[in-house]
Image (spheres, rainbow, N blue to C red):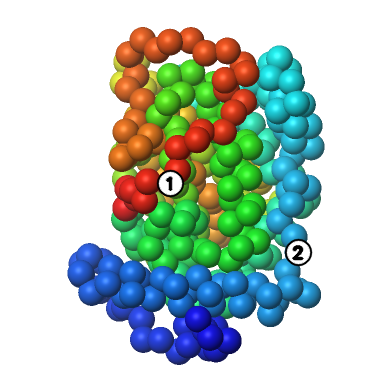
Amino acid sequence: MTSNSLSAARSIERPTRESMLQRSPSVQQFWLQNQDLFQDAWKQWEESESDKLNSLDSSLYDAALRTAVEQAWKDPGNESDVKALWKEVFPGVYEAQFFNPVQLATLRDYLNAVADADIPLRPPYGISLNRGGAMLDSRSEGYLAAPGFQAFYKTLMNTYMRPISRLLFPDVTGYDSQTFGFSIQWQPDTDTSLRAHTDASSVTLNINLNLPGEDFAGSGVRFFDNQTRQISELTFAPGTALIHHGSVPHESMPITEGERSNLVLWLYGEGGQVARGGIKTQPIDANQRWTLPDIKNDGFAPF
């Protein structure tokens, strides 16, 4: 790619909203034909904005979680300190403070700069044509390929999400080698809700990116327990996260005021294989949980 990749990416003709909603073959062709151009453009953009962008580093994480995770990687025998930070708020659904609310502005400022970069970025239109969202994983067409963000994303998935998922849900081990992620921004009168569904994941991590004082109304996440018929609508504070098996039915309720920003992250096995609840799995020890899989990205994207 040449030094003008950034300007070329900004001036390229983009697919229409209608063609994306209709899953037109030309849309996929657009992303595939221009993937090298867009990757190079994101690299150039990040370099050109280096004096304005704050680093996405470990200070973003809640201090207690960061310390517990760091200690567990040094000695997996300390993993109980990680587990103690997660509270079961619904059958099979756990909540914890994940990001430091004070530091969240760093990530939000970065994502706002991304939105203003004017480089084509594929919204997560597999779930809805969410205008403020983006695909985050390199397996996805039109993903956020800025090197700094990708380094942050890979640390989030490999250092935090995978071992925490194995700790809380032992059956996902072996069905967690592949990563997938997207961001969402819910706004009244645009992308307001998402009907009841399950995820094509072994485990899902949903992190609230709203800043302290950035209030919204509605937009809770409603969970359903198939065994007890229990229904509960949960809301979560800035920087907190909910984690659950992808098979847990849930829906996002309509937002009526303000905006809600989230990262939604998935783990699953090769070719989209997911853990099946109720199947007995071989127990693994702590040392196996705190490891990186040696299986490479298989290129499969759920949507």
In the picture, the disc for residue 54 is 2
Mark 1, residue position: 297
- Residue at (42, 66) in percent of width and height: 142
Q: Quadrant of residue 160?
A: top right
- Residue at (53, 75) in percent of width and height: 40
Q: Quadrant of residue 230?
A: top left
Residue 34 on image: x %, y %: 38, 76
Foreground: 119 or 222? 119
- Residue at (62, 26) in percent of width and height: 290
Left-right relation of 153 to 267: right
Left-right relation of 212 to 24: right
How packed is label 2: few (under 14 Cα within 10 Å), some, or many (20 or more)?
A: some
Residue 152 on image: x %, y %: 64, 52
Rendered view: 126 above or below 265: below
Residue 79 on image: x %, y %: 68, 19
Rendered view: 121 above or below 67: below
Asked whether the beta carbons under mark 1 and mark 2 sit within 8 Å of each other, the answer is no
**Camera sees residue 254:** yes
Residue 115 on image: x %, y %: 55, 72
**Camera sees residue 255:** no
Looking at the picture, which amino acid does disc 2 mark? Asn
- First reached walking from the N terminus: tag 1 or tag 2: 2
Q: Spatial distance from mark 1 to mark 2, Cα to Cα?
A: 28 Å
- Residue at (53, 50) in percent of width and height: 263
- Give the secondary structure at mark 2: loop
Looking at the picture, which amino acid does disc 1 mark? Asn
